[in-house]
Image (tube, rainbow, N blue to C red):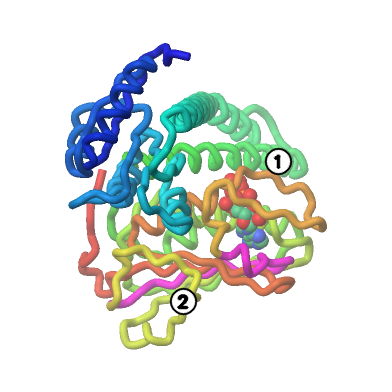
Amino acid sequence: MLAQNRDKILIVDDEQEIGQALKLYLTDEGYTPSLASDGTAALEMLVDEKDYAVMLLDINMPGLNGVAVLKRLQDAGSDTAVIMMSGHGSEELAVECMRNGAEDYISKPFALEDMLQRIERARAHRRERIEKRQLQQEKEDFILMLSHDMKNPLTAVIGSIDIIREGCLGAVNEEQEEYLQSAIDSCNEVVTMIDNLLDIRKFEAGKIQMAIHLYNTGEIVSKITHQFSRPARHDGIEFSVDVETGPHTIAVDKNSLTRVLGNLLGNALKFTPEGGMITVSCHYIPEDKVSTLTLPVYAQIPPDFPKTGSFVKLTIYNSGNGIPPDELDKIFDRYTQFTRKTDRERGGAGLGLAYCKLAIDSFHGVIWAESENGQGSTFVILLPCCSDGTATNNRSEG
Ligand SMILES: Nc1ncnc2c1ncn2[C@@H]1O[C@H](COP(=O)(O)OP(=O)(O)OP(=O)(O)O)[C@@H](O)[C@H]1O
Ligand SMILES: [Mg+2]
């Protein structure tokens, strides 16, 4: 059957006869084939015209060989489906090619009909892949639009409830105030979830705007922890804060760090059973004490995390079931939530920690979690410090 849409096929082979035979055959079959005689020429052709549906790529070529071309295509996120061709291939080579994103592998000599069938299959897979990605993109765009549009009415709801809670429209008793505050807290949870989602997308698209200035960590920590002491008390949780005050400053976006701490404290509240405890601490680690800090092997340290200097160490501990050791390196990935049979339904989207990691990375800090099953969890943040108040890290972005 003739290929109806005259898909473009790039044949890359230094053996002219094979290339020409394939080209003629594929033209007869309704395709639009082009020929490149080596890897470098193939990559140049792809720069000019990206919409090749399939590439038939010889492995053994002088200069840039087929495996190297395949890797370059993968790095560039190419859509072209690649069928590797080899005269003296081995199973290991085939496995390596498939691992590097090849669609198929064929040994020379091959029957032209066999090659045609493989091209058809590769085209179909490529089409499915593209359709799936488009659908995923549409889904994400829709979620983003919906989330964005939900924020305004929610903020209006919070504002209205707050006016009633403050007694502006008539006296409110203690119990009513408590209920209204709970409603505000729940709305704020949704707003935080939306902000996390929108900002994670901005981070990923490189479009996040941070207003980096120097701040005293203690002030930021004290303010946000104060907001969480009431709901903790309400849930019968002991809440203690140990913030070391001092002149040391950190270079951060205040709103962003506040949201990071809000996410961590929100999790702590969510995962601490009644009668449990949450402890927040904030300490300055001078340069001569930095060697006492031990980071677990699974902590993902960003490349620009400073190797010297002083730090501010923030920890948030909560009692409870803790986090299984094999989850500790995964919980910062977005949409990661692990479930335990004993857990009550806790809700959430699995976005909070992903936001925390991206934000802390952008401050050149590091965040990780520690937990021993059944012994609660501790989230630790290390932020580079400008201890004497001079802005060695002061950057102003956005
Ligand atoms: N303090 C904690 N104690 C126990 N498990 C935790 C704690 N913090 C996070 N986790 C685990 O890590 C997962 C991811 O947390 P994250 O904050 O990213 O998502 P979430 O709280 O489920 O949803 P969201 O933050 O989007 O509302 C949680 O679902 C939970 O399984
Ligand atoms: Mg959370």
Q: Quadrant of residue 269?
A: bottom right
The residue range painted magenta reads: 309-328
Residue 272 horizontal side relative to residue 24, left or right: right
Residue 311 shown in magenta: yes
Question: For the residue labelled by badge 2, is the local secondary structure a helix, a strand or a loop?
Answer: loop
Q: What kind of residue is marked 2? A: Leu
Kindly identify which numbered label has been placed on residue 295: 2
Assess mark 2: CB under 8 A from ligand 1? Answer: no
Q: Position of residue 282 (x, y in %)?
A: 47, 71
- Residue assigned mark 1: 177
Q: Nearer the viewer, mark 2 or mark 1?
A: 2
Q: Can residue 53 be seen in this view?
A: yes
**Residue farthest to the right, as pictured:** 342
Question: For the residue labelled by badge 1, is the local secondary structure a helix, a strand or a loop?
Answer: helix
Which residue is painted at 68% across and 37% down in the image?
183
Which residue is painted at 51% across and 57% down in the image?
261
